[in-house]
Amino acid sequence: MQALVLIEELGSIRAVAQAMSLTQPALTAAIQQLEAELKAPLLVRSRTGVTFTNFGQAFLRHAKLIVAQSRRAQDEIAQLRGHWEGTVRMAVSPAIGLGLLPQALRQFTLQHPNVKVHCRDGLYPNIAPVIRDGTLDFALTPVHRVDLESDLVAEPLYSSQVVIVSGVSHPLSRATRLKQLQDCDWVMSSPSRGPGAIIEEAFQKSGLAAPKVKMLCESFLALPAVVAASDDWMTTMPRVLFENSPFKEQLCMVPIQDALPSPLICTVRRHDLPLTPAAMQLVGWIQHYALKRLDKKAKN
Ligand code: TSU
């Protein structure tokens, strides 16, 4: 099963045999034995590589979950025995990555120096398949809770602040009302069910026609650069991303007075997969700093 998961990742039996320190004939024989047991071909081998049959794709969905679960089971037992090792795998939104994550990780890695952390970018709903198949332990991402699929659970952390941003030379960079922006060209930072859709929601609430979306840019590394280099594009991004952007000098936070929706950042995980003790502790640190942040906000 592990080999099949790796075959999908690496695309070649030879590469997988190497990665698993097996000979190619031994790996091929193991896969053939599995195919014989299942009475179904899983792979199609060709000169250009290897692809999955429909049976193979169906089996792979189970294999991924089983491989991820057995890794978690090993981690959990080791951690319950007091051996804090293994890996926590998560995805984070840009607001978390630039906001709470650095402090939370610092505390966590001081506490558990032998637990590896694998952190990647990701927003709901795009990230849902890799939470579902067990690749990730959890994601820290904005979610419309009404929109959450029933096999996932979301626990709220805090609301992030979103701002409208243009290049400094955009003719409407000093606009104060949403309706002034109705003819602008927009760069969306996520597909429609993600937080980038906030601008669509804001336009709808203000009784404006849907914004003209000219580009979908799902790279938060490229987004500020792309907008900074243009005189005609507007976008939305988390305030913390604008404030920390190396392109800040070429960007302008458009001072719109109409309220914009604030995405609720949540911890999202599969409802039927409990977190490992290490994952729980890391989430605990994130919750700790989220609460501190809420306290500070309430005091100001
Ligand atoms: S964040 O979740 O607060 O990082 C976020 C991401 C993307 C957009 C708004 C907020 C557009």
Image (cartoon, grey):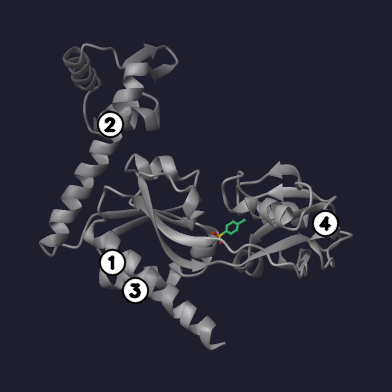
Frontmost of labels 4 and 3 is 4
* Residue behind mark 2: 62
- Mark 3 surroundings within 10 Å by alpha-carbon count, few (fewer than 14), some (14 through 19), many (20 or more): some
* Residue behind mark 4: 181
Q: Which mark is residue 107?
A: 3
**Among numbered discs 3 and 2, the one appearing first in the sequence:** 2
Is the residue 149 above or below the residue 180 in the image? Answer: above
Label 1's element? helix
The image shows residue 198 at horizontal and vertical percentages of 64, 55
**Among numbered discs 4 and 3, the one appearing first in the sequence:** 3
Alpha-carbon span between mark 3 and mark 1: 10 Å
Q: Which mark is residue 281?
A: 1
Alpha-carbon span between mark 1 and mark 2: 28 Å
The answer to whether 19 appears left or right of 76 in the picture is: right
The image shows residue 94 at horizontal and vertical percentages of 54, 59
| Badge 4 amino acid | Leu
**Among numbered discs 4 and 1, the one appearing first in the sequence:** 4
Residue ranking furthest to the bottom: 299
- Mark 4 surroundings within 10 Å by alpha-carbon count, few (fewer than 14), some (14 through 19), many (20 or more): some
The image shows residue 133 at horizontal and vertical percentages of 34, 39
As rendered, which of 137 and 220 lies closer to the eye?
A: 137
